Image: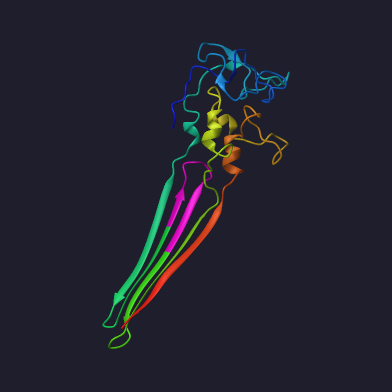
Amino acid sequence: LPEYQNQYGGRKGPNFEFSTGDGTVTNDGQGVNWGDKLNVGTEKKQFHSPIDAETGERIPIPWVAYPNNVKNFFEIGSIFSNNLSLSGRSENIGYRFTVTQMNQKGVVPNTDLERINISSNINAKIGKRVNLSTNFNFSKSGSSNLPSNGYSRSLMYNFLWFYRNVPISAVRSYWLPGQENVAQRNFETKWVNNVYFTAYENRNSFDKYRGYGTLKLDY
């Protein structure tokens, strides 16, 4: 991961106060970290502040850095591979069949990759002077979601704008209450998507099939 600074918090300039995240009420709609200095004992109304039950206002909380907020987004990936091979030989024929399956869980939440390869190879003597050889290969690759690259779709692009003063746990729930599947919630709403919205809703799926083979007669 890149090395992130943890001296200054969100916004361009001082006097941060979170309200709606779009800058229409307070100075909270800027996806940069050029704001007030962090870890100096100040408190501010922030995206992840608790709400006062009586007033409905956000309660100021410590203005501090979360150095691992990007790192904590990622998960432990895994790869599982299975292989089955059958082979044999007699006086006039030899063969080999192989099936390989691979399942991968990505380090980015909600990402995966599956691949299946099937191959066969047969050599047979079909006459005193005639030999037949054939091989066939088939592969299927697919994913319900692969990490995307490019402007706005890339998670790492989203993290360029991520406030250093926001813990990653604060954005795990990415729909606005009462507006599920309509409007997402984020620490700012003018520049980038919520990273979990990108991972779970802005999917990049595919299925790919490929097959090839050869048939050869030698006389």
Q: How is the image coloured?
A: rainbow
Tell me which corner region of the image, top left, top right, bottom left or bottom right, holds residue 195.
top right
- Give percent across and percent down for residue 82: 39, 59
- Give percent across and percent down for residue 115: 46, 57
Taking the image as shown, residue 94 lies to the left or right of residue 193, namely left
Q: Residue furthest bottom?
A: 128
Q: Residue furthest front?
A: 219
Mostly what secondary structure, the magenta segment? strand
Asked if the stretch drawn in magenta spans residue 172, the answer is no
How many marks are shown on the rendered structure?
0
Asked if the stretch drawn in magenta spans residue 103, the answer is yes
In the image, residue 7 above or below residue 78: above
Which residue does the image show at 56% across and 14% down from the upper left? 36
- The residue nearer to you, when weighing 122 against 169, is 122
Which residue does the image show at 46% across and 66% down from the upper left? 211
- The residue nearer to you, when weighing 176 against 134, is 134
- Give percent across and percent down for residue 57: 70, 19
Which residue does the image show at 50% across and 41% down from the upper left? 108
Magenta extent: 102-117
Tell me which corner region of the image, top left, top right, bottom left or bottom right, holds residue 139.
bottom left
Taking the image as shown, residue 104 lies to the left or right of residue 132, namely right
- The residue nearer to you, when weighing 129 against 2, is 129
